[in-house]
Image: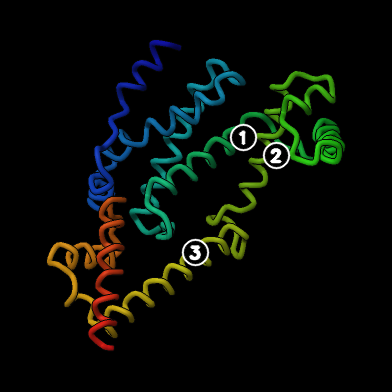
Amino acid sequence: MKDTLRLMAEAARPLATREEVMRAFTTGDFEALMGHYYAVAMQKGLEKAHLLGDEALDLIQEVALHIHKTLTAWRAGERVLPKSKWLSFWVDVEADRGVREWFYSNRGTGYRSSRLAAAINRAVARLQANLGREPRPEEIAQELGIPPEVVEEALAVAEAEAILSLDDTTEEGTPYREMIAQEEEDDLAAFEALEQAIEKYRLKEHLGQEEVQLLDRFLEGEDLEEDDLTRLEEALKAAMARAQVKVA
């Protein structure tokens, strides 16, 4: 397993900046993207190594494949890439989904209707009432007198069933889709307000050349570095103050 992990780690070649990631995505350089995101697949798989042993290697490969398929679908327009967060946020979401789908496929289905699931649900309800919070898997295992890994695996499969029911590629009008739609609507409203303020107060006239370039990149939907966003925010606030003083 160690030799295999070493080879996998050598395949992970993270890109240095967000701009490089977006450039690779825009140009369809999936080799660079997968080198960047292979580390995510390894992290997700190794988090479950205590449950799976050597099977964690299979999980890593499945998650990497899921990420590649998702990136390909986003790039081809077969699936909509939400714009409310930057690319790596949604890759991480999809990696988690890949883990849950693997458990769903390889650890059996129907836990929710099984005796084990029923026992766990009853134990969770009792412990939640007594503790006033969500019980940890170790506490559930102690309550039932079963190994913690059995509880963790059952909860993982139950979570897989839940997340698959929210999959925006298979169902319409799910809470997942509604959440994305709301975030996109909020983002659109914020952009419209900013564009109205820029036009009303002629803010570009009160910005330096570099800040104008940052603003144009931001309005075009580019993901800016945190320092650039902070700089742009401060420049816009100062420009608004100068514009309002001039109007007054």
Q: Position of residue 159 (x, y in %)?
A: 66, 41
**Label 3–label 1 contact, CB within 8 A:** no
Q: Quadrant of residue 76?
A: bottom left
Left or right of 135 in this view: 183: left
The amino acid pointed to by label 3 is Glu
Report the residue marked by disc 3: 183
Q: How many marks?
A: 3
Q: Which residue is at the far bottom?
A: 248
Instruction: Work out whether residue 185 or residue 38 is closer to the camera in this orientation and state it.
Output: 185
Q: Which one is earlier in the sequence, the residue at label 3 or at label 2? A: 2
Element assignment for label 2: helix
The amino acid pointed to by label 1 is Ser
Q: Which residue is at the far left?
A: 209
Q: Position of residue 16 (x, y in %)?
A: 24, 38
Element assignment for label 1: helix
The numbered mark at residue 105 is: 1
**Label 3–label 2 contact, CB within 8 A:** no
The numbered mark at residue 158 is: 2
Q: Residue at x 48, y 70 (%)?
A: 185
Q: Residue at x 31, y 63 (%)?
A: 233
Q: Residue at x 38, y 30 (%)?
A: 39
Q: Nearer the viewer, mark 2 or mark 1?
A: 2
Q: Position of residue 224 (x, y in %)?
A: 28, 55
Element assignment for label 3: helix
Q: Nearer the viewer, mark 3 or mark 2?
A: 3
Instruction: Work out whether residue 48 or residue 4 is closer to the camera in this orientation and state it.
Output: 48
Q: Which one is earlier in the sequence, the residue at label 3 or at label 1? A: 1
Query: Where 134 sits versus 243, above or below?
Result: above
Cα distance, mark 3 to mark 2?
Answer: 27 Å
Left or right of 19 in this view: 185: right
**Label 2–label 1 contact, CB within 8 A:** no
Query: Where 173 sits versus 133, above or below?
Result: below
